[in-house]
């Protein structure tokens, strides 16, 4: 992270969120969205065999990805955080303003996040190795995840 950004974060009394907090927030969000899918398809889940359930869920992959994009973009734009991030007391800020991302930034971040998931979570791994803890979706949207 460059010195100017470190100075700005320090001046605003912001610190980068730990990878551990980000990981727990990620799992909270994934569990929440998975439950929403299960609830939406409940009748088919109850009546079907394991193989039928797998086939059914695979047939809704695009819808599930769209649900993730809408969820991520809406909550990050509106609150600066998803439900998982709110629970973990972390939030997303634009580097330029240190405020909640606008709609285009939040949408960009959400789309690149889903692409990163499709590419074996390599973008998330990148964030573990990055000194600013920025994943591909953070780098693409010029955001940071900080403690709330």
Image (cartoon, helix red, strand yellow):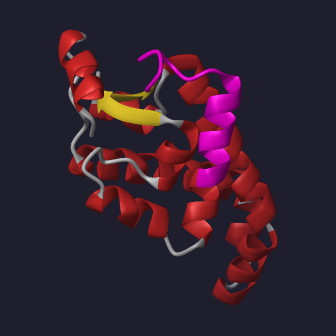
Q: Is residue 77 above or below residue 137?
A: above
**Region rendered in magenta:** 95-112
Residue at the image point whose x is 64% and y is 85% from the top = 50
**Residue drawn at (29%, 21%), measured in percent from left and top?**
148
Q: Does the magenta-highlighted stretch encompass residue 40?
A: no
Residue 144 figure quarter: top left
Q: Residue furthest bottom?
A: 51
Q: Residue furthest front?
A: 3
Q: Residue at x 69, y 24 (%)?
A: 103
In the displayed structure, would residue 85 be above or below residue 26?
above
Compared to residue 84, the image places residue 114 above or below, namely below
Query: Residue 130: horizontal and vertical position, in percent?
Result: 30, 55
Q: Is residue 147 visible?
A: no
Front-lying residue, 145 or 95 = 95
Q: Nearer the viewer, residue 33 or 1?
A: 1
The answer to whether one can see residue 18 in this image is yes
For the image, the number of numbered tags is 0
Where residue 89 appears, as percent x and y from the top left, is 29, 27
Q: On the picture, is 26 further left or further right than 57?
A: left
In the image shown, does 86 or 144 lie closer to the viewer?
144
Left or right: residue 109 compared with residue 3: right
Task: Write the residue at 22% across / 51% down.
Answer: 20
Furthest residue to the top?
Answer: 11
Between 131 and 36, the one lying in front of the other is: 131
Answer above or below: position of 49 versus 141: below
Q: Position of residue 69 (x, y in %)?
A: 68, 45
Residue 147 position within the rendered picture, expressed as x and y whole percent measured from the top left: 26, 27
Image quarter in which the N terminus is found: top left
């Amino acid at each position: 992270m460059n010195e100017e950004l470190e100075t700005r974060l320090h001046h605003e009394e912001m610190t980068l969120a730990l990878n551990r907090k980000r990981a727990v927030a990620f799992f909270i969000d994934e569990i929440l969205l998975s439950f929403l899918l299960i609830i939406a398809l409940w009748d088919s889940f109850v009546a079907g065999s394991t193989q039928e359930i797998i086939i059914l869920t695979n047939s809704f992959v695009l819808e599930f990805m769209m649900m993730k994009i809408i969820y991520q973009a809406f909550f990050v734009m509106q609150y600066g955080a998803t439900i998982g991030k709110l629970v973990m007391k972390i939030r997303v800020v634009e580097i330029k303003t240190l405020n909640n991302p606008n709609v285009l930034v939040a949408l960009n971040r959400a789309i690149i996040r889903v692409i990163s998931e499709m590419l074996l979570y390599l973008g998330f791994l990148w964030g573990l190795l990055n000194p600013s803890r920025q994943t591909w979706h953070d780098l693409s949207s010029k955001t940071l995840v900080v403690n709330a």
